[in-house]
Structure formats: C-alpha cells, structure tokens
Image (cartoon, rainbow, N blue to C red):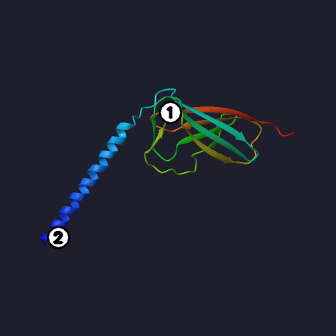
Amino acid sequence: MKWILFLIVGVLSLLTGCASERNGDAEEMNQEVEVQEVMSKELEVDFQVIPLSNETQFIISLTNRSDQLKKLEFHSSQKYEIIVTNDKGEEVFTYSKGKMFSQALETALLKSGENMEWEETWNHDPLPPGQYKAKVSILSHKSDNLSLEREWTVPPNN
C-alpha cells in the first residue's frame, strides 16, 4: 500500500514539474516577441475584382506596412465580408449570406511586410449591364477602417 502511495506522489511531482517547465517556456517566448496593437494606416487592405461571364473572383490581401509584429483578433472563422451592390445601390451579393462560421476567438500574427491573402469566387448568372461596386471589410475587431471598395462595369451585350 505504501509503495502505491509513493508511486502516486512521484508521478504527481513529475507532472507538476513538467507543467511548470512548459509554462516557463511559454513566458520566455512571449517575452521574445513583442506584439503591438494595430494603429491606423499600419495595415493595408487591397483586393482585385475579376469579373467573368458566370462568376466574379475576388482576391483579397492584408499587408502589415509597419516595422512591428501586429496581432489581429477575429470573433469567428469569418475573416472578411464582401458586399456587392448594383448601380441602384441594391445588394446583389453578400459573402456571408447563407454561410455559417464557427464562433471562436481566433488570433493571427502578421510580421512586418508580411501579408495574408484570401480568394473567393461568386458564382452567378450573367450580370445585367451596369455599374457594380464591391466592398471588402476585414473583420478583426481590434482594427478599424480595414475596408476598401472597387467598381467595375458590365458592358451591354452587342
């Protein structure tokens, strides 16, 4: 009976020591990498709209223009929103409509000069001729004004 108690105490001591050691490593890693909050104009959003006959492709990029590591926090697995309107101001496409996203806090670190890139395709019937506007917004809750608009024209069929 004593040897079982001795064995349990030994195992618990070993586990406690390993946990303390791992925690110390994590603290050292956090001290080595200083993450700065995102300030205005430090992150740059860009995107391309590539209209085709039955689909429109969007290529979205987010670039860290500062000289420091930046942290982005997202409240869900949705990292961006795309809204397309026609020349009457009517929404004709919303990326998130009909989709479900996991509700979990996600963090992304963006090094100086580094960028994140996403591609989306909107499958649709041929669009009526006219002017269209796409607005892309990055949904990090600690970063304001991470949005951009692009316009394009669908010409009349000849």
Please state which amino acid type lies under the numbered disc 1.
Ser
Residue 7 seen in the figure = yes
Count every numbered label the image shows and give the total. 2
Q: Is residue 6 left or right of residue 86?
A: left
Q: Nearer the viewer, residue 16 or 47?
A: 16
Quarter of the rendering occupied by the N terminus? bottom left
Q: In the displayed structure, would residue 102 be above or below residue 72?
A: below
Label disc, if present, on residue 4 of the rendered structure: 2
Q: Nearer the viewer, residue 141 or 42?
A: 42
Q: Residue at x 43, y 48 (%)?
A: 104
Q: Residue furthest left?
A: 2
Judging from the image, what secondary structure is the residue with disc 1 in? loop
Q: Residue at x 50, y 33 (%)?
A: 112
> Which residue carries the number 1 mark?
112
Q: CA distance from mark 2 to mark 1?
A: 55 Å
Residue 157 percent location from the top left of the image: 84, 40
Residue 95 percent location from the top left of the image: 60, 45
Q: Residue at x 19, y 67 (%)?
A: 7
Residue 76 percent location from the top left of the image: 47, 46
Quarter of the rendering occupied by the C terminus? top right
Can you tell which quarter of the image residue 5 is in? bottom left
Residue neighbourhood size for the residue with mark 1, other residues' Cα within 10 Å, grouped as few (<14), some (14–19), many (≥20): some
Residue 98 percent location from the top left of the image: 58, 50
Q: Residue furthest bottom?
A: 1
Q: Is residue 60 left or right of residue 16?
A: right
Q: Residue furthest right?
A: 158
Judging from the image, what secondary structure is the residue with disc 2 in? helix
Q: Is residue 128 left or right of residue 26?
A: right
Can you tell which quarter of the image residue 128 is in? top right
Q: Residue at x 60, y 40 (%)?
A: 82
Q: Nearer the viewer, residue 152 or 94?
A: 152
Going from the N terminus, do you reach mark 2 or mark 1 first? 2
